[in-house]
Amino acid sequence: NNNNNKDGTSSPWNLYALAEGGDPVRMNPITLETLETKPFQSNKETIKSTFSAHYKKDPKTGEIFNHGTVFGPKIKLNVMKLSSTGEPLGQKMTDLPIRSFVHDNILSENYFMVLVQPYSAPASSLLTSVLGGEPLGSQLSWNPEETPQSLALVFSKDSLELVAQVPLPILSTYHQIDAFEDPSNANLITFRT
């Protein structure tokens, strides 16, 4: 059960309801009637994962950056870039280095980042959820013994390539606000949660 009531986004022509683990739901902007549920797509590309409710919009270009999850034997993170009107411009899959739930993301001038924390669910939890059992989110638990650190995965905004995997002390944060690159130190990015 994943109600699409977490976040909404709109363009001059469309209104979407976004959830944590599914496809965007296009709605009638006047009546709020559900019109269709499907991934963002263009003539060239279709998003091949879930689409998080916590997208970030580049203040200079208007481009939308987001992440999604692909469930399988190994959980993959999909990072994506879309035009300001929601047309996919690119996406890259990467294996999550630890089995974890990724909730939000951060955008700086040149980088798109996600924080990977020691929240995880048993491998059987996805099947349980799909078969109508307990929702996946309620099966997550804090596992610092299994995952002794948090990680920041840093991606280039231009290429969407993973450029750094930074170990962090164990932390818990659901929402990230913004990030700033230090002009005097190219290796330092400060983020606020």
Image (cartoon, rainbow, N blue to C red):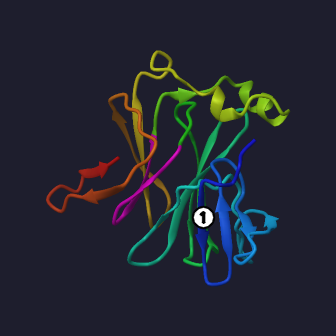
The answer to whether 77 is drawn above or below residue 84 in the figure is above
x%, y% of residue 75? 64, 37
**Span colored in magenta:** 103-115
Q: Secondary structure at mark 1?
A: strand
**Residue drawn at x 72%, y 32% as measured from the top left:** 73
Quarter of the image holding residue 53?
bottom right
Q: Residue furthest bottom?
A: 12
Give the crowd class for mark 1: few <14, some 14-19, many >=20 residues within 10 Å: some
Q: Residue at x 27, y 52 (%)?
A: 189
Image quadrant of residue 82?
A: bottom right
**What amino acid type should be assigned to the residue bearing mark 1?**
Gly
Left or right for 184, reference 125: left
User: Which residue is pictured at 56% across the width and 76% down the height?
Assistant: 83
In this rendering, is residue 65 above or below 19? Answer: below
In this rendered view, identify the residue nearer to me: 136 or 107.
136
- The residue shown at (60%, 74%) is 10
Coordinates of residue 90 in the picture (x, y in percent): 59, 67
Let me know if residue 107 is in the magenta part: yes
Q: Residue furthest top?
A: 145
**Residue with the most extreme left position:** 184
In the image, residue 151 sits, relative to residue 3, either above or below, namely above
Side (left or right) of 190 relative to 183: right
Image location (x, y in percent) of residue 185: 17, 55
Quadrant of the rendering where the N terminus is positioned: top right
Instruction: Count up the numbered dots.
Output: 1
Residue for badge 1? 8
Residue 167 on image: x %, y %: 35, 34
